[in-house]
Image (cartoon, rainbow, N blue to C red):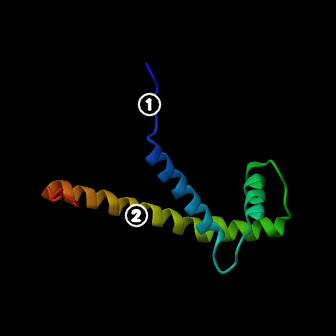
Amino acid sequence: MSSPRLHPTLLLSLLALIATAICALLLGRYQISIHEFLMFIATMLGISDMPAHRYDLLHSLIIEARLPRVIAAVLVGAGLSVSGAAYQGVFRNPLVSPG
């Protein structure tokens, strides 16, 4: 029995979502470089170490301020797409018809 595979379009969509979410975490009034973001993640995982004051600042910016907004945006977008698909399915009104 073969394992299920992800369709390439779905895989590209998931990668685009992850890349967009990471960009949203890095951009803002106080921009964070990719290097700082990776160091922050490594410090969270215990792999690396960074100064405590910088870690506290990045934790406040990323985890407490930006991450909830990004998660909310992803959930709202998913909810809107599911409700739109359900709406189209209930009323049998295809978005594009061959005619």
- Which of the pair 22/55 is nearer the observer? 22
Q: Where is residue 14 in the image (x, y as percent from the top left)?
A: 50, 51
SS for tag 1? loop
Q: Where is residue 79 in the image (x, y as percent from the top left)?
A: 35, 60
Give the residue pinned by disc 1. 4
Farthest residue in the top direction?
1
Give the residue pinned by disc 2. 77
Q: Residue at x 44, y 48 (%)?
A: 9
User: How many residues crowd around disc 1 within 10 Å: few (fewer than 14), some, or many (20 or more)?
Assistant: few
Q: Residue at x 22, y 60 (%)?
A: 96
Task: Tell me the quarter of the image containing the N terminus.
Answer: top left
The answer to whether 66 appears left or right of 86 in the picture is right
Q: What amino acid does circle 1 point to?
A: Pro
Q: What amino acid does circle 2 point to?
A: Gly
Q: Position of residue 38 (x, y in %)?
A: 74, 57
Task: Tell me the quarter of the image containing the C terminus.
Answer: bottom left
Farthest residue in the front direction?
99
- Which of the pair 37/85 is nearer the observer? 85
Q: Residue at x 43, y 61 (%)?
A: 75
SS for tag 2? helix
